[in-house]
Image (cartoon, helix red, strand yellow):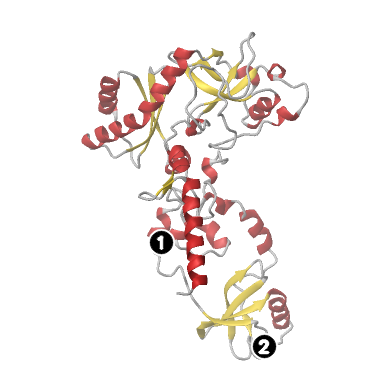
Amino acid sequence: MNDNSKNFTDKDHTQIENLDQYLDLDIRTGISAESKKISENIFLSRGIDNIPDSATSHCDNYKYSCCKLATYNWENELEGESSKTFPIAEVRFKNSHKDFYRLPDEGNFSVGDIVAVESNPGHDIGVVSMLGLAVKKQLQNRRIKPEDVAKKLYRHARVADIEKWISTVNMEHTTMLSSRYIAWDLDLKMKVNDVEYQGDGTKAIFYYSAEERVDFRELIKILADQFKIRIEMRQIGVRQEAARLGGIGSCGRELCCSSWLTNFQSVSTTTARTQQLSLNPQKLAGMCGKLKCCLNFEQSTYIEELKQFPNPNITLKTQKGKGIYNKIDIFKKIVWYSYANDTSTIFAIPLEKVNKIIKMNNDGKTPETLEEFAVVNTKKVDEGANYSLDELKNIEDK
Protein backbone atom coordinates (compact mmCIF):
# COMPACT_ATOMS: atom_id res chain seq x y z
CA MET A 1 0.00 0.00 0.00
CA ASN A 2 1.44 3.38 -0.99
CA ASP A 3 1.46 6.51 1.19
CA ASN A 4 -1.42 8.15 -0.65
CA SER A 5 -3.79 5.21 -0.10
CA LYS A 6 -2.72 5.02 3.57
CA ASN A 7 -3.48 8.72 4.08
CA PHE A 8 -6.85 8.30 2.43
CA THR A 9 -7.71 5.34 4.64
CA ASP A 10 -6.74 7.19 7.83
CA LYS A 11 -8.73 10.22 6.78
CA ASP A 12 -11.72 8.11 5.89
CA HIS A 13 -11.50 6.30 9.24
CA THR A 14 -11.41 9.65 11.06
CA GLN A 15 -14.53 10.76 9.21
CA ILE A 16 -16.36 7.60 10.26
CA GLU A 17 -15.34 8.11 13.90
CA ASN A 18 -16.58 11.70 13.78
CA LEU A 19 -19.86 10.56 12.23
CA ASP A 20 -20.35 7.92 14.95
CA GLN A 21 -19.64 10.55 17.59
CA TYR A 22 -22.13 12.91 15.96
CA LEU A 23 -24.83 10.25 15.84
CA ASP A 24 -23.82 8.72 19.20
CA LEU A 25 -24.14 5.36 17.45
CA ASP A 26 -24.33 2.16 19.45
CA ILE A 27 -22.00 -0.18 17.53
CA ARG A 28 -23.64 -3.29 19.02
CA THR A 29 -27.16 -2.43 17.86
CA GLY A 30 -26.53 0.05 15.06
CA ILE A 31 -29.14 2.41 16.57
CA SER A 32 -28.34 6.05 17.26
CA ALA A 33 -29.19 7.61 20.60
CA GLU A 34 -31.62 9.98 18.89
CA SER A 35 -33.44 7.11 17.16
CA LYS A 36 -33.57 5.17 20.43
CA LYS A 37 -35.01 8.22 22.19
CA ILE A 38 -37.74 8.54 19.57
CA SER A 39 -38.60 4.82 19.62
CA GLU A 40 -38.92 4.83 23.40
CA ASN A 41 -41.17 7.90 23.49
CA ILE A 42 -44.66 6.60 24.22
CA PHE A 43 -46.23 10.03 23.70
CA LEU A 44 -45.41 10.25 19.98
CA SER A 45 -48.75 8.58 19.27
CA ARG A 46 -50.36 11.62 20.90
CA GLY A 47 -48.38 14.17 18.92
CA ILE A 48 -45.81 14.93 21.64
CA ASP A 49 -42.12 14.35 20.95
CA ASN A 50 -41.18 14.12 24.64
CA ILE A 51 -42.71 13.20 27.99
CA PRO A 52 -44.78 16.22 29.11
CA ASP A 53 -43.82 18.22 32.18
CA SER A 54 -46.40 17.83 34.94
CA ALA A 55 -45.54 21.31 36.27
CA THR A 56 -47.19 23.05 33.33
CA SER A 57 -50.44 22.47 31.47
CA HIS A 58 -48.96 23.67 28.16
CA CYS A 59 -46.93 21.24 26.09
CA ASP A 60 -44.12 23.00 24.23
CA ASN A 61 -43.21 19.71 22.57
CA TYR A 62 -46.52 19.30 20.73
CA LYS A 63 -45.80 18.92 17.01
CA TYR A 64 -48.03 19.32 13.99
CA SER A 65 -46.30 16.78 11.77
CA CYS A 66 -44.88 13.97 13.90
CA CYS A 67 -48.02 11.91 14.22
CA LYS A 68 -51.05 10.54 12.43
CA LEU A 69 -53.64 12.89 10.97
CA ALA A 70 -51.55 15.97 11.63
CA THR A 71 -53.30 19.22 10.75
CA TYR A 72 -52.02 22.67 9.82
CA ASN A 73 -53.85 25.54 11.49
CA TRP A 74 -53.89 28.21 8.79
CA GLU A 75 -55.74 30.55 11.19
CA ASN A 76 -52.46 31.32 12.97
CA GLU A 77 -51.36 33.36 9.96
CA LEU A 78 -54.41 35.63 10.16
CA GLU A 79 -54.05 38.72 12.28
CA GLY A 80 -56.59 39.27 15.02
CA GLU A 81 -57.87 35.70 15.00
CA SER A 82 -58.06 33.77 18.28
CA SER A 83 -59.86 30.86 19.90
CA LYS A 84 -62.74 33.20 20.75
CA THR A 85 -63.77 33.30 17.08
CA PHE A 86 -65.25 29.82 17.45
CA PRO A 87 -66.35 28.23 20.75
CA ILE A 88 -65.27 24.66 19.86
CA ALA A 89 -61.83 23.07 20.08
CA GLU A 90 -60.40 19.93 18.51
CA VAL A 91 -58.65 17.70 21.06
CA ARG A 92 -56.46 14.75 20.09
CA PHE A 93 -55.77 11.62 22.07
CA LYS A 94 -53.95 8.47 20.95
CA ASN A 95 -53.26 7.81 17.25
CA SER A 96 -56.33 8.71 15.17
CA HIS A 97 -58.57 9.38 18.18
CA LYS A 98 -59.73 12.99 17.91
CA ASP A 99 -62.90 14.67 19.10
CA PHE A 100 -64.54 18.10 19.36
CA TYR A 101 -65.37 19.83 22.65
CA ARG A 102 -67.16 23.01 23.56
CA LEU A 103 -64.90 25.59 25.25
CA PRO A 104 -65.79 27.05 28.66
CA ASP A 105 -66.80 30.69 28.94
CA GLU A 106 -63.70 31.56 30.97
CA GLY A 107 -60.07 30.74 30.26
CA ASN A 108 -57.67 31.16 27.36
CA PHE A 109 -56.59 28.09 25.44
CA SER A 110 -53.94 27.56 22.77
CA VAL A 111 -52.73 24.69 20.61
CA GLY A 112 -50.60 22.33 22.69
CA ASP A 113 -52.48 22.85 25.96
CA ILE A 114 -53.08 19.70 27.99
CA VAL A 115 -56.74 19.79 28.99
CA ALA A 116 -59.33 17.80 30.91
CA VAL A 117 -62.44 16.98 28.89
CA GLU A 118 -65.78 15.33 29.49
CA SER A 119 -65.95 11.54 29.25
CA ASN A 120 -68.19 8.71 30.35
CA PRO A 121 -67.41 7.90 33.08
CA GLY A 122 -65.09 10.48 34.64
CA HIS A 123 -62.87 12.72 32.54
CA ASP A 124 -60.17 12.26 29.92
CA ILE A 125 -56.90 14.06 29.26
CA GLY A 126 -55.95 15.24 25.79
CA VAL A 127 -53.98 17.86 23.89
CA VAL A 128 -55.62 20.77 22.06
CA SER A 129 -54.76 20.29 18.40
CA MET A 130 -56.84 23.00 16.73
CA LEU A 131 -58.74 26.18 17.61
CA GLY A 132 -60.71 28.91 15.91
CA LEU A 133 -62.10 29.01 12.39
CA ALA A 134 -60.07 25.98 11.34
CA VAL A 135 -62.21 23.85 13.68
CA LYS A 136 -65.33 25.14 11.95
CA LYS A 137 -63.90 23.95 8.65
CA GLN A 138 -63.10 20.54 10.15
CA LEU A 139 -66.69 20.21 11.37
CA GLN A 140 -67.94 20.99 7.87
CA ASN A 141 -65.63 18.35 6.39
CA ARG A 142 -66.98 15.75 8.80
CA ARG A 143 -70.57 16.96 8.33
CA ILE A 144 -71.05 17.75 12.00
CA LYS A 145 -73.23 20.69 13.03
CA PRO A 146 -71.71 22.96 15.73
CA GLU A 147 -74.88 22.74 17.80
CA ASP A 148 -74.51 18.94 17.89
CA VAL A 149 -71.20 19.20 19.78
CA ALA A 150 -72.35 18.60 23.37
CA LYS A 151 -69.18 17.40 25.13
CA LYS A 152 -67.44 20.01 27.27
CA LEU A 153 -63.82 20.96 27.73
CA TYR A 154 -63.56 21.44 31.49
CA ARG A 155 -60.24 23.18 32.17
CA HIS A 156 -56.48 23.06 31.87
CA ALA A 157 -55.08 19.85 33.32
CA ARG A 158 -53.73 20.12 36.85
CA VAL A 159 -50.46 18.65 38.10
CA ALA A 160 -52.26 15.62 39.56
CA ASP A 161 -54.12 15.10 36.26
CA ILE A 162 -50.91 15.09 34.19
CA GLU A 163 -49.09 12.79 36.60
CA LYS A 164 -52.00 10.34 36.49
CA TRP A 165 -52.11 10.63 32.69
CA ILE A 166 -48.40 9.84 32.35
CA SER A 167 -48.73 6.80 34.62
CA THR A 168 -51.69 5.41 32.66
CA VAL A 169 -49.94 5.91 29.32
CA ASN A 170 -46.96 3.97 30.70
CA MET A 171 -49.31 1.07 31.47
CA GLU A 172 -50.74 0.76 27.94
CA HIS A 173 -48.05 -1.45 26.40
CA THR A 174 -47.88 -3.91 29.30
CA THR A 175 -51.68 -4.05 29.42
CA MET A 176 -51.81 -4.88 25.72
CA LEU A 177 -49.27 -7.71 26.11
CA SER A 178 -51.10 -9.10 29.15
CA SER A 179 -54.43 -9.05 27.30
CA ARG A 180 -52.86 -10.95 24.40
CA TYR A 181 -51.61 -13.70 26.70
CA ILE A 182 -55.04 -13.95 28.36
CA ALA A 183 -56.75 -14.18 24.94
CA TRP A 184 -54.34 -16.95 23.92
CA ASP A 185 -55.01 -18.87 27.13
CA LEU A 186 -58.75 -18.63 26.44
CA ASP A 187 -58.11 -19.82 22.86
CA LEU A 188 -59.84 -16.79 21.36
CA LYS A 189 -59.32 -16.25 17.62
CA MET A 190 -58.51 -12.57 17.97
CA LYS A 191 -55.56 -10.21 18.14
CA VAL A 192 -55.38 -7.25 20.52
CA ASN A 193 -53.73 -4.52 18.46
CA ASP A 194 -53.70 -1.54 20.78
CA VAL A 195 -54.83 -0.28 24.18
CA GLU A 196 -55.81 3.28 25.03
CA TYR A 197 -56.31 4.30 28.65
CA GLN A 198 -58.62 7.11 29.65
CA GLY A 199 -56.75 9.99 31.24
CA ASP A 200 -58.15 9.41 34.74
CA GLY A 201 -57.28 5.70 34.63
CA THR A 202 -60.84 4.45 35.14
CA LYS A 203 -61.38 3.01 31.67
CA ALA A 204 -59.39 1.41 28.82
CA ILE A 205 -60.32 0.79 25.19
CA PHE A 206 -58.99 -2.47 23.71
CA TYR A 207 -58.73 -2.45 19.92
CA TYR A 208 -58.76 -5.93 18.39
CA SER A 209 -59.08 -7.59 15.00
CA ALA A 210 -60.69 -10.95 14.26
CA GLU A 211 -61.83 -12.78 11.15
CA GLU A 212 -64.86 -14.30 12.87
CA ARG A 213 -67.26 -13.34 15.62
CA VAL A 214 -65.59 -13.62 19.04
CA ASP A 215 -67.26 -14.24 22.40
CA PHE A 216 -64.99 -12.22 24.70
CA ARG A 217 -67.26 -12.02 27.75
CA GLU A 218 -64.91 -14.18 29.80
CA LEU A 219 -61.96 -12.07 28.60
CA ILE A 220 -63.66 -8.88 29.82
CA LYS A 221 -64.26 -10.38 33.25
CA ILE A 222 -60.61 -11.38 33.61
CA LEU A 223 -59.32 -8.01 32.36
CA ALA A 224 -61.65 -6.04 34.63
CA ASP A 225 -60.65 -8.16 37.63
CA GLN A 226 -56.92 -7.89 36.88
CA PHE A 227 -56.65 -4.19 36.02
CA LYS A 228 -59.58 -2.86 38.12
CA ILE A 229 -60.88 -0.67 35.30
CA ARG A 230 -63.86 -0.45 33.00
CA ILE A 231 -63.26 -2.39 29.76
CA GLU A 232 -64.43 -1.39 26.28
CA MET A 233 -63.75 -3.66 23.28
CA ARG A 234 -63.62 -2.16 19.77
CA GLN A 235 -63.19 -4.32 16.71
CA ILE A 236 -61.19 -2.88 13.82
CA GLY A 237 -60.29 -4.22 10.38
CA VAL A 238 -56.83 -4.98 9.06
CA ARG A 239 -56.72 -1.60 7.32
CA GLN A 240 -57.54 0.21 10.55
CA GLU A 241 -54.93 -1.91 12.33
CA ALA A 242 -52.23 -0.78 9.90
CA ALA A 243 -53.44 2.81 10.26
CA ARG A 244 -53.08 2.69 14.05
CA LEU A 245 -49.71 0.95 14.08
CA GLY A 246 -48.22 2.97 11.19
CA GLY A 247 -45.27 2.08 9.00
CA ILE A 248 -43.45 2.80 5.73
CA GLY A 249 -44.98 1.84 2.39
CA SER A 250 -43.24 0.42 -0.66
CA CYS A 251 -43.00 3.98 -2.02
CA GLY A 252 -40.74 4.94 0.89
CA ARG A 253 -43.25 7.31 2.46
CA GLU A 254 -45.36 7.00 5.60
CA LEU A 255 -48.52 4.96 5.13
CA CYS A 256 -51.38 7.05 3.73
CA CYS A 257 -53.81 5.54 6.25
CA SER A 258 -51.58 6.54 9.16
CA SER A 259 -50.88 10.08 7.95
CA TRP A 260 -53.91 11.58 6.19
CA LEU A 261 -56.35 9.00 4.80
CA THR A 262 -59.50 8.68 6.92
CA ASN A 263 -62.08 6.91 4.73
CA PHE A 264 -61.23 3.50 3.30
CA GLN A 265 -62.71 2.73 -0.11
CA SER A 266 -63.02 -0.78 -1.49
CA VAL A 267 -60.18 -1.86 -3.80
CA SER A 268 -60.56 -4.77 -6.24
CA THR A 269 -58.24 -6.61 -8.62
CA THR A 270 -60.17 -4.97 -11.47
CA THR A 271 -58.38 -1.75 -10.53
CA ALA A 272 -55.00 -3.45 -10.96
CA ARG A 273 -56.05 -4.91 -14.31
CA THR A 274 -57.23 -1.52 -15.53
CA GLN A 275 -53.80 -0.06 -14.73
CA GLN A 276 -52.06 -2.98 -16.49
CA LEU A 277 -50.29 -4.05 -13.29
CA SER A 278 -48.84 -7.48 -12.71
CA LEU A 279 -51.27 -9.55 -10.63
CA ASN A 280 -48.61 -10.34 -8.06
CA PRO A 281 -50.06 -10.38 -4.52
CA GLN A 282 -46.68 -9.50 -3.00
CA LYS A 283 -46.51 -6.30 -5.07
CA LEU A 284 -50.17 -5.31 -4.89
CA ALA A 285 -50.67 -5.85 -1.16
CA GLY A 286 -49.88 -3.17 1.40
CA MET A 287 -48.79 -3.42 5.03
CA CYS A 288 -52.29 -4.58 5.98
CA GLY A 289 -52.17 -7.54 3.60
CA LYS A 290 -54.95 -6.10 1.43
CA LEU A 291 -54.76 -4.30 -1.91
CA LYS A 292 -53.04 -0.93 -1.62
CA CYS A 293 -55.41 2.00 -1.20
CA CYS A 294 -53.26 4.07 -3.58
CA LEU A 295 -54.46 1.93 -6.50
CA ASN A 296 -57.67 3.95 -6.38
CA PHE A 297 -55.92 7.33 -6.52
CA GLU A 298 -55.18 7.26 -10.27
CA GLN A 299 -57.95 4.93 -11.35
CA SER A 300 -60.11 7.71 -12.83
CA THR A 301 -57.13 9.01 -14.83
CA TYR A 302 -56.46 5.56 -16.26
CA ILE A 303 -60.11 5.11 -17.21
CA GLU A 304 -60.09 8.47 -18.99
CA GLU A 305 -56.84 7.71 -20.85
CA LEU A 306 -58.03 4.24 -21.89
CA LYS A 307 -60.78 5.83 -23.97
CA GLN A 308 -58.08 6.81 -26.51
CA PHE A 309 -57.04 3.18 -27.02
CA PRO A 310 -58.79 0.65 -29.28
CA ASN A 311 -60.99 -2.12 -27.93
CA PRO A 312 -58.83 -5.11 -26.84
CA ASN A 313 -61.21 -7.42 -28.75
CA ILE A 314 -60.24 -5.83 -32.07
CA THR A 315 -57.71 -7.90 -34.04
CA LEU A 316 -55.22 -6.44 -36.52
CA LYS A 317 -55.43 -8.22 -39.86
CA THR A 318 -52.14 -8.63 -41.77
CA GLN A 319 -51.02 -10.87 -44.60
CA LYS A 320 -48.79 -12.79 -42.17
CA GLY A 321 -51.64 -13.43 -39.74
CA LYS A 322 -54.01 -11.87 -37.24
CA GLY A 323 -52.57 -9.67 -34.48
CA ILE A 324 -54.15 -10.11 -31.04
CA TYR A 325 -54.02 -7.62 -28.17
CA ASN A 326 -51.64 -8.28 -25.22
CA LYS A 327 -51.13 -5.11 -23.16
CA ILE A 328 -50.74 -1.34 -23.35
CA ASP A 329 -48.53 1.41 -21.97
CA ILE A 330 -50.71 4.42 -21.27
CA PHE A 331 -47.79 6.79 -20.65
CA LYS A 332 -45.83 5.92 -23.81
CA LYS A 333 -49.00 5.45 -25.93
CA ILE A 334 -47.88 1.99 -27.03
CA VAL A 335 -49.93 -1.18 -27.59
CA TRP A 336 -48.41 -4.67 -27.65
CA TYR A 337 -49.71 -7.24 -30.16
CA SER A 338 -48.70 -10.77 -31.08
CA TYR A 339 -49.66 -13.13 -33.87
CA ALA A 340 -52.47 -15.54 -33.09
CA ASN A 341 -50.34 -18.47 -34.27
CA ASP A 342 -47.22 -17.30 -32.36
CA THR A 343 -47.87 -15.67 -28.98
CA SER A 344 -44.28 -15.99 -27.73
CA THR A 345 -43.16 -12.77 -29.47
CA ILE A 346 -44.97 -9.49 -28.93
CA PHE A 347 -44.64 -6.27 -30.91
CA ALA A 348 -44.78 -2.76 -29.41
CA ILE A 349 -46.73 -0.59 -31.82
CA PRO A 350 -47.40 3.15 -31.25
CA LEU A 351 -51.05 4.04 -30.73
CA GLU A 352 -51.26 6.20 -33.86
CA LYS A 353 -49.97 3.32 -36.01
CA VAL A 354 -52.45 0.92 -34.40
CA ASN A 355 -55.27 3.27 -35.34
CA LYS A 356 -53.78 3.45 -38.85
CA ILE A 357 -53.86 -0.37 -39.20
CA ILE A 358 -57.44 -0.50 -37.93
CA LYS A 359 -58.45 2.14 -40.47
CA MET A 360 -56.72 0.16 -43.25
CA ASN A 361 -58.61 -2.98 -42.19
CA ASN A 362 -61.90 -1.09 -42.22
CA ASP A 363 -61.09 0.09 -45.77
CA GLY A 364 -60.46 -3.50 -46.82
CA LYS A 365 -56.65 -3.22 -46.87
CA THR A 366 -54.18 -5.49 -45.02
CA PRO A 367 -50.52 -4.60 -44.36
CA GLU A 368 -47.88 -7.26 -44.85
CA THR A 369 -46.67 -7.70 -41.23
CA LEU A 370 -46.83 -6.17 -37.79
CA GLU A 371 -43.03 -5.84 -37.77
CA GLU A 372 -43.08 -2.89 -40.14
CA PHE A 373 -45.07 -0.87 -37.58
CA ALA A 374 -43.38 -2.13 -34.41
CA VAL A 375 -40.75 -0.17 -32.50
CA VAL A 376 -39.71 -3.04 -30.18
CA ASN A 377 -39.92 -6.82 -30.48
CA THR A 378 -39.61 -8.79 -27.26
CA LYS A 379 -40.42 -12.13 -25.68
CA LYS A 380 -43.70 -12.32 -23.82
CA VAL A 381 -43.42 -12.57 -20.01
CA ASP A 382 -46.59 -13.14 -17.97
CA GLU A 383 -45.68 -12.12 -14.43
CA GLY A 384 -49.10 -13.00 -13.05
CA ALA A 385 -49.28 -16.47 -14.52
CA ASN A 386 -47.91 -18.21 -11.42
CA TYR A 387 -50.52 -16.81 -9.04
CA SER A 388 -53.88 -18.47 -8.50
CA LEU A 389 -57.23 -16.75 -8.17
CA ASP A 390 -57.39 -17.81 -4.52
CA GLU A 391 -54.19 -15.87 -3.77
CA LEU A 392 -55.61 -12.76 -5.43
CA LYS A 393 -58.96 -13.08 -3.62
CA ASN A 394 -57.17 -13.17 -0.25
CA ILE A 395 -55.90 -9.62 -0.74
CA GLU A 396 -59.09 -8.28 -2.31
CA ASP A 397 -61.68 -6.48 -0.18
CA LYS A 398 -64.67 -8.62 0.67
Q: Residue furthest top?
A: 106
Determine crowd level at label 2: few under 14, some 14-19, many 20+ residues with C-alpha closer than 10 A.
Answer: few
- Helix, strand or loop status at disc 2: loop
**Res 215 visible:** no
Image point 64% across, 59% down: which residue?
A: 302
The image quadrant of residue 110 is top right
Q: Is residue 37 above or below residue 377?
A: above
Spatial CA distance of label 1 from label 2 is 38 Å
Residue under label 1, please give it.
389
Q: Is residue 151 left or right of residue 211?
A: right
Q: Position of residue 380 (x, y in %)?
A: 51, 78
For discs 1 and 2, the disc positioned in front in the rendered view: 2
Q: Residue furthest right?
A: 79
Say above or below: 366 vs 178: below
List the residue tagged with mark 2.
372
Residue type of the residue flagged with mark 1: Leu
Asked where in the image residue 305 lies, by quadrant, the reply is bottom right
Image coordinates of residue 165 in percent, x first then y, are 43, 20
**Crowding near the residue tagged with mark 1, few <14, some 14–19, many ≥20 C-alpha atoms within 10 Å:** few
The mark tally for this picture is: 2
Secondary structure under the numbered disc 1 in the rendered image: helix
- Asked if residue 118 is positioned above or below residue 298 in the image, the reply reads above
